[in-house]
Image (cartoon, grey):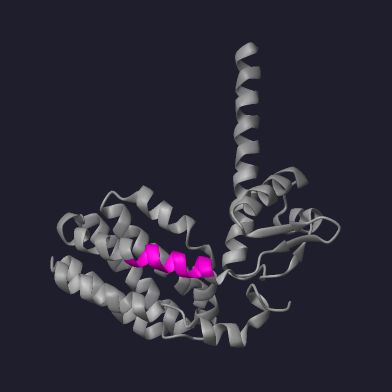
Amino acid sequence: MLINKLSEKGEEKITQQSMRSNGYSAIKDQIIKLELRPGQKVTENELAERFQVSRTPIREAIVRLSQEGLIDVYPQRGTFVSLIDEEHVEEGRFMREHMEIAVVKLACEKLSGTALQDLSENLVLQEMSVKEKNYQRIFQLDEDFHRIIFAGCRKQRTWQSVQSMMVNLNRTRMLSLASEYNWEMILHQHQHIYEAVKNQKPEEAEHIMKEHLSLVNIDLAELKERYAHYFQGEET
Protein backbone atom coordinates (compact mmCIF):
# COMPACT_ATOMS: atom_id res chain seq x y z
CA MET A 1 0.00 0.00 0.00
CA LEU A 2 2.79 2.42 0.96
CA ILE A 3 4.74 1.52 -2.18
CA ASN A 4 1.64 2.20 -4.30
CA LYS A 5 1.14 5.58 -2.64
CA LEU A 6 4.79 6.51 -3.16
CA SER A 7 4.51 5.40 -6.77
CA GLU A 8 1.40 7.51 -7.30
CA LYS A 9 3.12 10.54 -5.77
CA GLY A 10 6.11 9.97 -8.02
CA GLU A 11 3.91 9.76 -11.11
CA GLU A 12 2.03 12.88 -10.02
CA LYS A 13 5.33 14.75 -9.60
CA ILE A 14 6.49 13.68 -13.07
CA THR A 15 3.15 14.78 -14.54
CA GLN A 16 3.38 18.18 -12.87
CA GLN A 17 6.97 18.61 -14.07
CA SER A 18 5.90 17.64 -17.58
CA MET A 19 3.06 20.16 -17.52
CA ARG A 20 5.44 22.90 -16.38
CA SER A 21 8.01 21.99 -19.02
CA ASN A 22 5.44 21.57 -21.77
CA GLY A 23 3.76 24.87 -20.98
CA TYR A 24 7.07 26.71 -21.04
CA SER A 25 8.32 24.95 -24.20
CA ALA A 26 5.04 25.41 -26.06
CA ILE A 27 4.86 29.15 -25.36
CA LYS A 28 8.53 29.67 -26.20
CA ASP A 29 8.15 27.71 -29.44
CA GLN A 30 5.21 29.86 -30.53
CA ILE A 31 7.11 33.04 -29.66
CA ILE A 32 10.01 31.94 -31.87
CA LYS A 33 7.64 30.92 -34.68
CA LEU A 34 5.85 34.27 -34.35
CA GLU A 35 2.55 32.54 -33.70
CA LEU A 36 2.67 34.68 -30.58
CA ARG A 37 3.73 37.97 -32.13
CA PRO A 38 6.13 40.55 -30.66
CA GLY A 39 4.07 43.05 -28.66
CA GLN A 40 1.02 40.77 -28.49
CA LYS A 41 -0.91 40.93 -25.23
CA VAL A 42 -1.48 37.56 -23.53
CA THR A 43 -3.28 36.38 -20.41
CA GLU A 44 -2.98 33.29 -18.25
CA ASN A 45 -6.52 32.22 -19.12
CA GLU A 46 -5.99 32.57 -22.87
CA LEU A 47 -2.70 30.67 -22.78
CA ALA A 48 -4.12 27.93 -20.56
CA GLU A 49 -6.97 27.43 -23.01
CA ARG A 50 -4.65 27.64 -26.02
CA PHE A 51 -2.31 24.91 -24.71
CA GLN A 52 -4.90 22.88 -22.79
CA VAL A 53 -3.12 23.07 -19.43
CA SER A 54 -4.01 24.58 -16.08
CA ARG A 55 -3.12 28.14 -15.15
CA THR A 56 -0.38 27.07 -12.70
CA PRO A 57 2.15 25.85 -15.31
CA ILE A 58 1.25 28.84 -17.47
CA ARG A 59 1.93 31.21 -14.59
CA GLU A 60 5.28 29.51 -13.94
CA ALA A 61 6.14 29.60 -17.65
CA ILE A 62 5.42 33.34 -17.79
CA VAL A 63 7.79 33.95 -14.87
CA ARG A 64 10.52 31.90 -16.55
CA LEU A 65 10.04 33.52 -19.95
CA SER A 66 10.01 36.94 -18.29
CA GLN A 67 13.41 36.15 -16.78
CA GLU A 68 14.64 35.23 -20.26
CA GLY A 69 13.37 38.50 -21.72
CA LEU A 70 10.67 36.94 -23.90
CA ILE A 71 7.68 38.12 -21.89
CA ASP A 72 7.16 41.59 -20.42
CA VAL A 73 4.85 41.99 -17.43
CA TYR A 74 3.62 45.53 -16.75
CA PRO A 75 1.59 46.20 -13.59
CA GLN A 76 -1.80 47.72 -14.42
CA ARG A 77 -1.19 47.17 -18.16
CA GLY A 78 -0.85 43.43 -18.60
CA THR A 79 1.48 40.78 -20.01
CA PHE A 80 2.99 41.07 -23.47
CA VAL A 81 5.29 39.09 -25.75
CA SER A 82 8.52 41.09 -25.73
CA LEU A 83 9.54 43.14 -28.73
CA ILE A 84 12.68 42.03 -30.58
CA ASP A 85 15.86 43.45 -29.06
CA GLU A 86 18.31 44.37 -31.84
CA GLU A 87 21.29 44.18 -29.48
CA HIS A 88 20.33 40.64 -28.49
CA VAL A 89 20.01 39.72 -32.16
CA GLU A 90 23.60 40.84 -32.79
CA GLU A 91 24.92 39.04 -29.73
CA GLY A 92 23.24 35.80 -30.79
CA ARG A 93 24.66 36.19 -34.30
CA PHE A 94 28.16 36.74 -32.89
CA MET A 95 28.10 33.64 -30.70
CA ARG A 96 26.53 31.46 -33.38
CA GLU A 97 29.07 32.46 -36.00
CA HIS A 98 32.08 31.63 -33.85
CA MET A 99 30.76 28.36 -32.45
CA GLU A 100 29.38 27.04 -35.76
CA ILE A 101 32.66 27.57 -37.60
CA ALA A 102 34.67 25.87 -34.86
CA VAL A 103 32.32 22.89 -34.67
CA VAL A 104 32.06 22.26 -38.43
CA LYS A 105 35.86 21.98 -38.64
CA LEU A 106 35.79 19.53 -35.75
CA ALA A 107 33.03 17.57 -37.49
CA CYS A 108 35.38 16.83 -40.39
CA GLU A 109 37.45 14.78 -37.95
CA LYS A 110 34.91 13.40 -35.51
CA LEU A 111 31.47 13.03 -37.08
CA SER A 112 30.25 9.43 -37.06
CA GLY A 113 28.60 7.54 -39.89
CA THR A 114 25.32 7.65 -37.97
CA ALA A 115 25.45 11.44 -37.72
CA LEU A 116 26.28 11.70 -41.43
CA GLN A 117 23.26 9.53 -42.21
CA ASP A 118 21.08 11.77 -40.03
CA LEU A 119 22.34 14.82 -41.95
CA SER A 120 21.61 13.12 -45.27
CA GLU A 121 18.06 12.30 -44.23
CA ASN A 122 17.60 15.83 -42.93
CA LEU A 123 18.62 17.23 -46.33
CA VAL A 124 16.00 15.10 -48.08
CA LEU A 125 13.34 16.58 -45.80
CA GLN A 126 14.70 20.09 -46.36
CA GLU A 127 14.38 19.65 -50.11
CA MET A 128 10.77 18.52 -49.74
CA SER A 129 9.96 21.47 -47.48
CA VAL A 130 11.50 23.98 -49.91
CA LYS A 131 9.30 22.59 -52.69
CA GLU A 132 6.28 22.85 -50.41
CA LYS A 133 7.29 26.38 -49.31
CA ASN A 134 6.78 25.34 -45.71
CA TYR A 135 8.95 27.97 -44.03
CA GLN A 136 8.25 26.83 -40.46
CA ARG A 137 9.33 23.30 -41.36
CA ILE A 138 12.40 24.68 -43.14
CA PHE A 139 13.32 26.60 -40.01
CA GLN A 140 13.03 23.50 -37.81
CA LEU A 141 15.02 21.33 -40.23
CA ASP A 142 17.68 24.05 -40.44
CA GLU A 143 17.93 23.97 -36.66
CA ASP A 144 18.07 20.17 -36.65
CA PHE A 145 20.82 20.13 -39.29
CA HIS A 146 23.12 22.27 -37.16
CA ARG A 147 22.15 20.47 -33.94
CA ILE A 148 23.12 17.11 -35.48
CA ILE A 149 26.60 18.47 -36.20
CA PHE A 150 27.05 19.71 -32.63
CA ALA A 151 25.69 16.47 -31.15
CA GLY A 152 27.87 14.39 -33.48
CA CYS A 153 30.91 16.21 -32.09
CA ARG A 154 29.71 15.63 -28.50
CA LYS A 155 29.06 19.34 -28.06
CA GLN A 156 25.43 19.19 -26.95
CA ARG A 157 25.95 21.61 -24.06
CA THR A 158 27.65 24.06 -26.40
CA TRP A 159 24.62 23.84 -28.68
CA GLN A 160 22.31 24.52 -25.74
CA SER A 161 24.38 27.54 -24.74
CA VAL A 162 24.20 28.91 -28.27
CA GLN A 163 20.45 28.30 -28.39
CA SER A 164 19.91 30.19 -25.14
CA MET A 165 21.17 33.33 -26.87
CA MET A 166 19.45 32.75 -30.22
CA VAL A 167 15.80 33.53 -29.51
CA ASN A 168 15.73 37.09 -30.82
CA LEU A 169 17.91 36.13 -33.79
CA ASN A 170 15.61 33.20 -34.49
CA ARG A 171 12.58 35.47 -34.53
CA THR A 172 14.24 37.63 -37.18
CA ARG A 173 15.21 34.51 -39.13
CA MET A 174 11.58 33.43 -39.05
CA LEU A 175 10.52 36.82 -40.40
CA SER A 176 12.94 36.40 -43.28
CA LEU A 177 11.92 32.82 -44.04
CA ALA A 178 8.28 33.88 -44.08
CA SER A 179 9.27 36.27 -46.87
CA GLU A 180 10.76 33.37 -48.89
CA TYR A 181 14.29 34.51 -48.12
CA ASN A 182 16.83 32.44 -50.13
CA TRP A 183 15.30 29.09 -49.23
CA GLU A 184 16.99 27.22 -52.07
CA MET A 185 20.37 28.86 -51.42
CA ILE A 186 20.19 27.80 -47.75
CA LEU A 187 19.47 24.22 -48.88
CA HIS A 188 22.36 24.22 -51.36
CA GLN A 189 24.78 25.49 -48.75
CA HIS A 190 23.66 22.81 -46.30
CA GLN A 191 24.30 20.22 -49.00
CA HIS A 192 27.81 21.61 -49.58
CA ILE A 193 28.54 21.63 -45.85
CA TYR A 194 27.47 18.00 -45.69
CA GLU A 195 29.76 17.04 -48.59
CA ALA A 196 32.74 18.87 -47.07
CA VAL A 197 32.24 17.17 -43.69
CA LYS A 198 31.68 13.77 -45.31
CA ASN A 199 34.89 14.13 -47.35
CA GLN A 200 36.80 15.46 -44.32
CA LYS A 201 37.73 18.82 -45.81
CA PRO A 202 37.86 21.22 -42.83
CA GLU A 203 39.04 24.30 -44.76
CA GLU A 204 36.26 23.88 -47.32
CA ALA A 205 33.70 23.25 -44.56
CA GLU A 206 34.83 26.40 -42.76
CA HIS A 207 34.62 28.48 -45.94
CA ILE A 208 31.11 27.27 -46.80
CA MET A 209 29.90 27.71 -43.23
CA LYS A 210 31.13 31.32 -43.24
CA GLU A 211 29.25 31.95 -46.49
CA HIS A 212 26.19 30.22 -45.07
CA LEU A 213 26.16 32.28 -41.90
CA SER A 214 26.71 35.50 -43.84
CA LEU A 215 23.68 34.59 -45.96
CA VAL A 216 21.42 34.08 -42.98
CA ASN A 217 22.73 37.17 -41.20
CA ILE A 218 19.67 39.34 -41.18
CA ASP A 219 19.45 42.77 -42.76
CA LEU A 220 17.92 44.33 -39.69
CA ALA A 221 17.40 47.70 -41.32
CA GLU A 222 15.13 46.13 -43.95
CA LEU A 223 13.26 44.02 -41.42
CA LYS A 224 12.77 46.97 -39.08
CA GLU A 225 11.36 48.98 -41.97
CA ARG A 226 8.89 46.21 -42.86
CA TYR A 227 8.05 45.14 -39.30
CA ALA A 228 8.75 48.27 -37.26
CA HIS A 229 6.10 47.39 -34.66
CA TYR A 230 7.93 44.14 -33.80
CA PHE A 231 11.14 45.83 -32.63
CA GLN A 232 12.13 47.69 -29.49
CA GLY A 233 12.49 51.42 -29.89
CA GLU A 234 9.57 51.66 -32.26
CA GLU A 235 6.00 52.64 -31.55
CA THR A 236 3.73 49.65 -31.06
Instruction: Name the residue rendered at 19%, 66% in the picture.
Output: 197
Instruction: Name the residue rendered at 66%, 49% in the picture.
Output: 61
Q: Quadrant of the N terminus?
A: top right
**Residue nearest the observer in this picture, 146 or 72:** 72
Residue bounds of the magenta highlight: 87-97
Residue 113 image position (x, y, % from top left): 20, 57
**Residue nearest the observer in this picture, 19 or 235:** 235
Residue 129 image position (x, y, % from top left): 44, 77
Image position of 108 with respect to 129: above or below:
above
> As drawn, is 75 to the left or to the right of 5?
right
Image position of 160 with respect to 183: above or below:
above
Whether residue 23 appears in magenta in the rendering, the answer is no
Whether residue 94 appears in magenta in the rendering, the answer is yes
Residue 167 image position (x, y, % from top left): 52, 63
Q: Quadrant of residue 29?
A: bottom right
**Residue nearest the observer in this picture, 161 or 180:** 161
> As drawn, is 40 to the left or to the right of 29?
right
> As drawn, is 161 to the left or to the right of 49?
left
Q: Quadrant of residue 201?
A: bottom left
Instruction: Name the residue rendered at 15%, 67% in the picture.
Output: 202
Total labels: the figure holds 0
Residue farthest toward the top in the current orientation of the protein:
2
Instruction: Name the residue rendered at 63%, 48% in the picture.
Output: 64
**Residue nearest the observer in this picture, 113 or 220:** 220
